[in-house]
Image: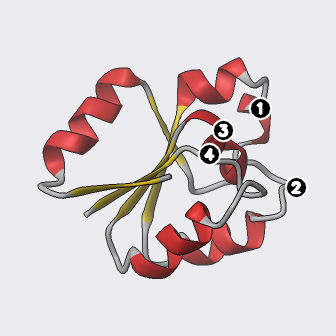
Amino acid sequence: MLHIVNKSPTDGNALDSALRLSGSGALLLIEDGVYAATRGNPAEARIRDALERLKIYVLAPDLDARGMSDRLTEGVTPVDYAGFVDLVAEHPNCQSWL
C-alpha cells in the first residue's frame, strides 16, 4: 500500500498514524509533508527508523518550493510528478492521511 501524507510533522498526527500503520509498504510525502523528509525536523528520527522497513519518497517540486532540497534525509527518494503517478500505478491501494 502507498501511504500519502501532506501535513507537516508538527501539524496533527497524520505522519505518526501513517508510520504506525504502514507495515512494509511505501510512504510518499507531499505538500507540507515534505518537511518530515528533512534533516533537523522533529520527525527525523522516526523517518530514519521507518526507512528500515519502508520505502520513503518525497515529491521533489514540493521540497524545492519550500527551499529544503539541500536538507533531504539520506535514504529518502525524491520523485517528480511522473514518479508520483508511477507510485500510484505500482500500488493497487493508496491511503491519504489528512
Instruction: Report the amino acid beneath label 2.
Output: Gly
Q: Which amino acid does label 4 sit on?
A: Gly
Q: Name the amino acid, label 3.
A: Asp
Q: What residue is at 26 percent from the left and 43 percent from the top?
A: 87
Circle 4 Cα neighbour tier, 10 Å, few/some/many (<14 / 14–19 / ≥20): many
Q: Which of pointers 1 and 3 lies earlier in the amino acid sequence?
A: 3
Image side of residue 21 versus residue 15, left or right: left
Mark 4 touching mark 3, by CB under 8 A?
Answer: yes
Which corner quadrant of the image does residue 86 belong to? top left
For disc 2, the neighbor class at 10 Å (few under 14, some 14 to 19, many from 20) is few
First-in-chain label (1 vs 2): 2
Q: How far is disc 2 from disc 3 in space, using C-alphas? A: 15 Å
Q: Which mark is residue 68?
A: 1
**Relative vertical location of residue 62 with respect to residue 26 in this rendering, above or below:** above
Query: On the image, numbered disc 4 is attached to which residue?
Result: 33
Q: What element carries label 2?
A: loop
Horizontally, residue 27 falls left or right of residue 87, namely right
Give me the disc on residue 40: 2
Cα–Cα span, label 1 and label 2: 11 Å
Q: Which residue is drawn at 56% across and 52% down?
A: 76
Alpha carbons under labels 2 and 4: distance apart? 14 Å
At which x and y percent is residue 53?
A: 44, 78
Q: What element carries label 4?
A: helix
Q: Is mark 3 on a helix, strand or loop?
A: helix
Image x and y of residue 84, in percent:
34, 33
Q: Looking at the image, which residue is at 60% across and 26% down?
A: 62
Q: In which quarter of the image is the N terminus?
A: bottom left
Q: Which mark is residue 32?
A: 3
Q: CA gap, disc 1 to disc 3?
A: 11 Å
First-in-chain label (1 vs 4): 4
